[in-house]
Amino acid sequence: MEINKFERVLSYFDEDGDGKISPSELRNRLGLMGGELLPAEAELAVESLDSDGDGLLCVGDLARLLDVGEDEKLKDLKEAFAMYDAEGCGFITPKGLKRMLRKLGERKSTKECKAMICRFDLNGDGLISFEEFQIMMA
């Protein structure tokens, strides 16, 4: 995520325009979005994320928080990819795709699996690399 995206998030939560998010601002905005945070929970959340000890969240604190979300997504993608990479070769092969689809209750021929892979195989090697899998799942 680019810094301007973090700044937009910060400006949404920053009710008083001071460039930082207080526990009450965090609680109020989450409430408007349908979430619920008790005052003590908001204090604890800000305290755990506050990098400079001023009791407020700055754009850098938000960036670290949201990047953790990106790291978690990447971890989940790697786990999903590993399920299809049954042979452990670092690629999704037609055979591996067929095997995983069978486990999911879907019967496909090897030819059908090759055609499925072909749609997302950007370098034409007949396999899906993790990078191609990321693009496919985006």
Image (cartoon, rainbow, N blue to C red):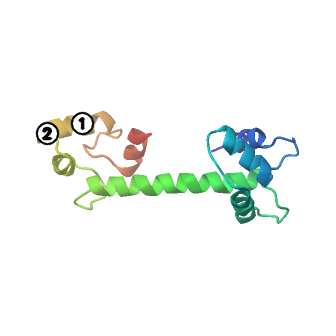
In the image, is 101 to the left or to the right of 38?
left
Task: First in sequence, mark 2 or 1: give its number.
Answer: 2
79 or 12: which is nearer to us?
Answer: 12
Q: Tag 2: residue type?
A: Lys
Pinpoint residue 100: horizontal percent, then vertical percent.
Answer: 21, 50
45 or 19: which is nearer to us?
Answer: 45
Q: Residue furthest front?
A: 38
Tags 2 and 1 touching, CB below 8 Å: yes
Q: Residue at x 69, y 55 (%)?
A: 38
The quarter of the rendered structure image containing the N terminus is top right
The reply to whether residue 58 is visible in this rendering is: no
Q: Is disc 2 surrounded by few (<14), some (14 to 19) or many (20+) residues within 10 Å?
A: some
Q: Secondary structure at mark 2?
A: loop
Q: Residue at x 58, y 57 (%)?
A: 68
Q: In this picture, is 28 found above or below 81?
A: above
- Residue 137: which quarter of the image? top left
- Residue 18: which quarter of the image? top right
Q: Tag 1: residue type?
A: Met
- The dot on residue 116 is 1
Residue corresponding to mark 2: 108
Pinpoint residue 120: horizontal percent, then vertical percent.
Answer: 33, 37
Q: Is disc 1 surrounded by few (<14), some (14 to 19) or many (20+) residues within 10 Å?
A: some
Q: In this picture, is 119 found above or below 53?
A: above
46 or 41: which is nearer to us?
Answer: 41
Of badges 2 and 1, nearer the viewer stands: 2
Q: In this picture, is 20 found above or below 52?
A: above
Q: CA distance from mark 2 to mark 1?
A: 10 Å
Pinpoint residue 131: horizontal percent, then vertical percent.
Answer: 41, 48
Q: Secondary structure at mark 1?
A: helix
